[in-house]
Amino acid sequence: MTRNIKIIAALAIAVITCSSQTQASDEKSLNLRPGKVHESCHKLDAGSKINYSFQVSSETLFNLHYHMDKEIKYPVAEQQALKDSGTVYINTTQTYCLMWTNPQQHTVTLRYSIETAKR
């Protein structure tokens, strides 16, 4: 019985440790009208990472950026894409924004998933 309690305690500690490493997740599906922008912003500390993936029904402009004073820094440069995924390792504590802009003349459907975690 004591051995079982030790195993359960070890598993509980492992679950708590793994759970504390995930800071946040964001998953959405939305319609983005012509010329409109959608941002998903996350305050991240140095030593974190952000995993993202997305898919749109027609090409949109996508980037991942943060503001430093009056300058905009792009860990993921703006690009036209139907889908993308990646992991960005955070070296500077900032608010990081994933941004989609619809350049189409019609509404597009955007689906994305974002997870932030400590490295």
Image (tube, helix red, strand yellow):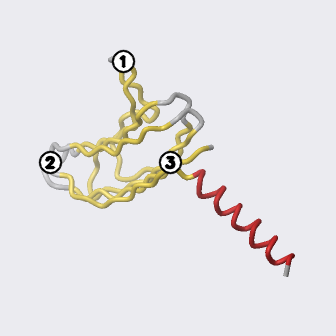
Q: Residue 38 carries which label?
A: none
Rendered residue at 86%/76% (across/down): 3
Kindly identify which numbered label has been placed on residue 69. 1
Side of 114 where 78 appears, left or right: left
As measured in the structure, the alpha-carbon distance from the residue carrying label 2 to the one carrying label 3 is 29 Å
Residue type marked 3: Thr
Residue type of the residue flagged with mark 1: Asp
Whether residue 72 sits left or right of residue 7 in the image: it is left
Q: Nearer the viewer, residue 102 or 13?
A: 13
**What kind of residue is marked 2?**
Pro
Q: Who's the residue at 36% across and 41% down the image?
A: 41
Which residue carries the number 2 mark?
Answer: 34
Nearest-to-viewer mark from 1 and 2: 1
Q: Residue at x 16, y 43 (%)?
A: 35
Q: Residue at x 40, y 21 (%)?
A: 68
Q: Give the foreground label among 2 and 3.
A: 3
Is label 3 in a helix, a strand or a loop?
Answer: strand
Q: Quadrant of residue 30?
A: bottom left
Q: Earlier in the sequence, mark 1 or mark 2?
A: 2
Task: Report x, y in % for residue 60.
Answer: 28, 46
Q: Mark 3 points at which residue?
A: 116
Q: In the picture, residue 69 is in which quadrant? A: top left
